[in-house]
Amino acid sequence: MLKIGLTGGIATGKSTVSLLLKERGFPVVDADNIARQVVEPGRVAYGKIVDVFGTGILNEDNTIARKKLGAIIFQDEENRQKLNSIVHPEVRKAMARQTEEAFRSGSHTVFLDIPLLIESKLMPMVDKIIVVYVPETIQLQRLMARDNLTRAEAESRIQAQMPIDEKLSYASAVLYNDGTLEQTKQQLDQLLQKWDIRK
């Protein structure tokens, strides 16, 4: 039973690699998806977030307005820490549960897609770490285009994470995602072969 962490930075193309792994039949536990689920109305984290940040962060249907909350936490380290201390324990519990379910279903390898794997010091959760990498200049361009952000907004989101170059020292392997999709696929398939990864 092998647990492989998949990480990178915002807009480095981690979701693309995640999709390629699913296409190859591997189970992928997605921290971002789980993070969205654990803050839905009625869940433990939802109540705590509203208590801390107030009802001003809610949409008309009482769901959390991610952009409003994002605007608060990306500008303020203390608020970001408060939010993380509420959301992260719930996400970790759900990830552990989904990983166990995948192993019980007969999988030999589970990929854990965790954007903040290194920042949150979750390295002990996995056996190996793949970092999806692009240079910061490309990261900035992609993020501005993808989320329709100004340069300043994109820079503040990138700076809220550990610099992508720093993450390389934690990597068991690096996938360079600044070329074509075909090149990324080739790198991934070569890595799976090199590590002799079984589904």
Image (cartoon, rainbow, N blue to C red):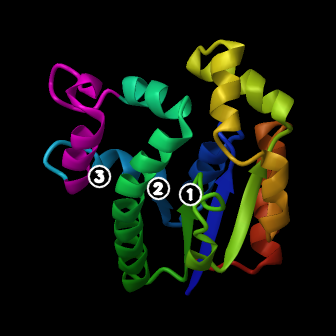
Crowding around mark 3 (Cα neighbors within 10 Å: few <14, some 14 to 19, many 20+) is some
- What crowding class fits label 2: few (fewer than 14 Cα within 10 Å), some (14-19), or many (20 or more)? many
Which picture quadrant has residue 66? top left
> What residue lies at 75% left-to-right and 57% top-to-bottom?
131
Q: Is residue 30 visible?
A: yes
Q: Secondary structure at mark 2?
A: helix
Measure how far apart labels 2 and 3 are at the Cα level. Answer: 10 Å
Marks 2 and 1, Cα distance to the nearest angstrom? 5 Å
* Amino acid identity at mark 3: Val
Mark 2 highlights which residue?
31
Q: Specify the quadrant of the image occupied by residue 166.
A: bottom right
Q: Amino acid at mark 1?
A: Ile
- According to the picture, the residue beneath numbered tag 1 turns out to be 114
Query: Magenta includes 49?
Result: yes
Q: Nearer the viewer, residue 21 or 112?
A: 112
Task: Say what secondary structure mark 3 lies in.
Answer: helix
**Residue range highlighted in magenta:** 44-65
Q: Is residue 81 above or below residue 192?
A: above
Reply yes or no: does residue 91 show up in magenta: no
Q: Position of residue 31 (x, y in %)?
A: 47, 55
Between discs 2 and 3, the one toward the N terminus? 2
